[in-house]
Each structure stands twice: as C-alpha cells, then as structure tokens.
Amino acid sequence: MTVTEIAPTSAAALEDVLSAAHGAAAAWAQTPARVRAQALLAIADALDAAAEELIPLAQEETNLAPARLGGELKRTTFQLRLFAELLVDGGYLDARIDHADEAWPMGARPDIRRVLEPLGPVLVFAASNFPFAFSVLGGDSCSALAAGCPVVVKVHSGHPRLSAAVGRVATAALAAAGAPAGLLALIYGTQSGRDALLDPRIKAGAFTGSIPGGRALFDLANSRPDPIPFFGELGSVNPVFVMAEAAAARGAEIVDGFMASYTLGAGQFCTKPGILLVPAGSGMVQDLAAAARPAPALLLNERIQSGYVDALQELLEHPDVRPLGGTEDALAAPPAPSLAATTAAALLADPEALITECFGPAALVVAYENDGELLAVAEALDGQLTATIQGEDGDALAPELVRILAGKAGRVLWNQWPTGVSVTYAQQHGGPYPATTAPASTSVGTAGIARFLRPVAYQGLPAHLLPAALRDDNPLGIPQRVDGTLAL
Ligand code: NAP
C-alpha cells in the first residue's frame, strides 16, 4: 500500500480549526467531568458501532490484518471507557486543601488549595503503526479530551481515509452528546502540522513516531516565543538480557518467546525487542539461527519499508555484524523476518551504530562473555521504553541489573516480553530521551491524563470563588487531600 496523497489543509481552513478549538476550550474546561465522561462513552459506542466500516478501511491503508485491527479498535474504545471512569472518580484532579494554620511550624500559613486544570487546545500527531489506538481517537486524544482540552489531530499520511472516517464518527457522537463545536478537528499535511504547532492557541503537543520527526517537532515547540510542552514518544530498541542461569534452565523456551515477540505485527511496534543479549557459549545463538520464522508480511507503507531497509542494510554492513541464519529476502518487500549477530565487546566499542532501531521484523543478537560485559551494556544504553530481564529466582546479578535498567527505561520486565502494552492504572509507557521527549510522563494508561493538566493554587479565596473540587463541602464527592491527609 502506498502512502495516499491527500490535499493538505489550507491556511484558511487551519485558521478556522484553530479558532474553533480556541473557542471551545473554556466551555469544555468548564463542562463537569461527569458530562465529559458521557461524551467519551458516546465516542466509544459510536466507534464500536462503526467497526464494520472502519476495519476494512484500516486494512486497505495499513496492510494490517483484520483480527489485529479489531483488537486494536477494542483497545481504543476500552481506553475511552476507562478514562470516563477516571473522570467520574475525580482522583486525577489531585485536589489539595491546606487550611490556614497559625501554628504551622515554619510560620503561620495561609489557606492554599491546589487542583489540576486543563492546559488548552492540544495538537496530536497521529502514529502510523496504530491506526486506531495511537491515531485520531487514540491514547493522546482520549487523555486530552478527558483532561478538558480541545484536540486538533495532525492526521498521519499513512491512513488519511480511515482518519477522516474516525473523525466523522467521533465528531457526530460529540455533537449528539452536547459537546462544544470545534472540540475535535483533523488537519492534513506536514506543513499544516508545523504551522499549528507554532500557533499561540495550541498549548501542548503529543506525538508518536520517529526520532528525527519527533525531535524536529520538539525543537519547533521549544522555538516558540512561548514554548509549550511536547510529549513525543520516539524510538527504542527494548533490550532483553538473558542471564546465564536462565539460558541454561530454559534457553529453548526463551528463544521461542523472543521469536514470537520480535516478529509480532511484522516488528512494527515501538516495544519490539530489538536487541537480545545471550551468554556466549550457551548454545542460544545457534538455536536462534535455526529457529522457525513467520512468513514475510507487507509493512505499513512504502515509507516504513524504505526506512526499514535502509536501517537494516546499514546494520548488516557493519564490520562486526553478521547475518544469523537465513537472511535471504530480509531486504525484500515484503521483508522476511531476520536476525543479525554481534558481540558485547563490539557493541560497547560502537554503541551509536549498533544500538539502533530497525522498525520492522529484525533484531540483533549480542553474545556476552561475562557479568561485567552484561552490566557494561546496560550502562551504555540510552533511554528506552522498556528493558527486560530473563532470569531465575536467586540470580545474584539481578538486583544490580534491575537498578541500572530502572535508570534507563520506563518499564522493566521480568520473564515476560515487552511487545504488549496494557492500558491500566499503573502502566508506564515512556522513558528518558530518545524513548521520549518527556520522561516524567506516560502515553499509555490513566496516568497519561496528567500531561494535559496544569496545577493552579488558589490562596485565600472565598468558597464561592473556588472551583468545586476545592470546596470544603466537596460537592463533587471526589478524593481531597485535606491538611495532608487523603480523604476518600
Ligand atoms: P514519522 O516520520 O516520525 O512521522 C510521524 C508524524 O510526524 C507524521 O504525521 C509526520 O507527518 C510528522 N512529521 C515527521 N517529521 C516531521 C517534521 N520534520 N515536520 C513536521 N511534521 C513531521 O513517523 P512514521 O511515518 O510513523 O514512521 C517512520 C519511523 O518512525 C518508523 O520507521 C519508525 O522508526 C518510527 N516509529 C516509531 C514509533 C514508536 O512508537 N516509537 C511508531 C511508529 C513509527 P507526515 O505524515 O505528513 O510526513
């Protein structure tokens, strides 16, 4: 499937979108959270009802299989419903009330009350590889709308017709639910995304995609006279460390799990395990070379295909890298799943070239000689979305490795595989740069709402001027931290 050409949004149309988003901001921010929750539920129901129209469109534009797309749509509507629950609960507001206290140890304190409030219109750059879950009504849009922010979506050029259809279904559901006009709008074209990001009416950006693209947009957001937060989720190699005891105890099982994880969805997941460290001499390298691989599958679009071929070719041309097992057709379209091999010593000598993301069905197997090399590779990593340990209970090296990896990755896994990212309360999908441009946040899970909220403290205000969330009589019935104690 080629990237579909579509007319970019004109300057006049972009002005209308931004002006409408700006106009909707105050009304949506003041809409009670319970009513915003109803709107999210209405979108979820409408998307579920439109599945038969949306899934074939998604398949046509992305080459992804209907079963995968159906699961992704389910995840997307589940996510909208989970955020609706979050709004009803109200804990996300982090309401804090400190009453005035003459006896406060550092000197008398005034009455101060703090709550999280919506940032304003958010510009979402949709991802290519999740046409539902990280696109028009994906995690970024869902958390921004839940937070009380209008959303302008810069449609991904890989699935414009699906985006338009999702936008149409969601906009109709929002209108029927009584949401303000202009709350959700779509724009098309690379330049319109850049123009929107520079517009003073946009108050935050959210992005999932490549390191060069995300970095360019992060720099643009920061170049504004009034820089804004830019939540970019970029690249990651998601290393997996196989400890010596685990290799000896269940090497074959680990090989099976790894083969399934790195080839899932033709390797087009930001959480694909791209580097597997195995003990030299354990026999795992040979087992990996001999392992069965799934049939080639078409990648999302021509841009992803050519980016993948360029990255893999460069890796394979490195003097210290050799193909592992049959790599015939590894660079073809569709590409056959492939593996390459190197050593930890070579990786440590040239980490910039060898710790690199190949977005597609390829991974690098790295043989290490001893514990010191294993820890040195962990130390050499840059920021990651995930890092995984395959170990055995009682492993003496594991505590040190966990400590190092927690300093590098947003999510540390033990004896599991990183590819699945469940939408939950405790999920963390993020990590230090270049995994993201905002390591203190997550783009998956309910904690993602915090990206689009801003704390405001009210000092000395009478009750009738306070937001409802901060009143002593707690009319919303939400959790409040009163004088340091959480009242549920
Ligand atoms: P991309 O090239 O970074 O594009 C993502 C979005 O950002 C698109 O809407 C694109 O606009 C826009 N964009 C990119 N560079 C821009 C710039 N300099 N100025 C303005 N807008 C810009 O990502 P992709 O097309 O999805 O995939 C390319 C690569 O990204 C993959 O090969 C893979 O390495 C990586 N990727 C990572 C993840 C992840 O989850 N971390 C997910 C998907 C892809 P246009 O569409 O108009 O060009």
Image (tube, helix red, strand yellow):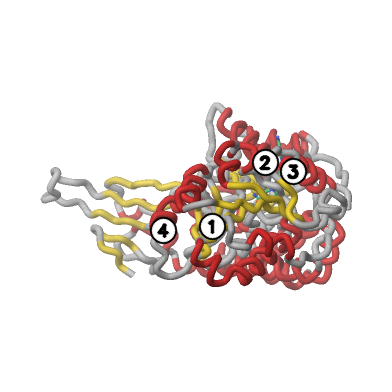
Label 2 vs label 4: CA separation? 27 Å
Q: Nearer the viewer, mark 2 or mark 1?
A: 2
Label 3 vs label 4: CA separation? 32 Å
311 or 119, which is in the foreground?
Answer: 311
95 or 333, which is in the foreground?
Answer: 333
How many residues crowd around disc 2 within 10 Å: few (fewer than 14), some, or many (20 or more)? some
Q: Which mark is residue 397?
A: 4
For the residue with label 3, is its CB less than 8 Å from the closest atom of ligand 1? no
Mark 1 — residue? 241
Mark 3 — residue? 316
Decide: marks 3, 4 in contact (CB < 8 A)? no
Q: Which mark is residue 320?
A: 2
Residue at the image position 50 percent from the left and 57 percent from the top:
411
Secondary structure state at the residue bearing disc 4? loop
Secondary structure state at the residue bearing disc 3? helix
Q: Amino acid at mark 3?
A: Leu
Decide: marks 1, 3 in contact (CB < 8 A)? no
Specify whether 42 is left or right of 415. right
How many residues crowd around disc 1 within 10 Å: few (fewer than 14), some, or many (20 or more)? many
First in sequence: mark 2 vs mark 4: 2
Residue at the image position 57 percent from the left and 46 percent from the top:
344
Classify the position of the C terminus by image quarter. Answer: bottom left
For the residue with label 1, is its CB less than 8 Å from the closest atom of ligand 1? no
First in sequence: mark 1 vs mark 3: 1
Q: Nearer the viewer, mark 3 or mark 2?
A: 2
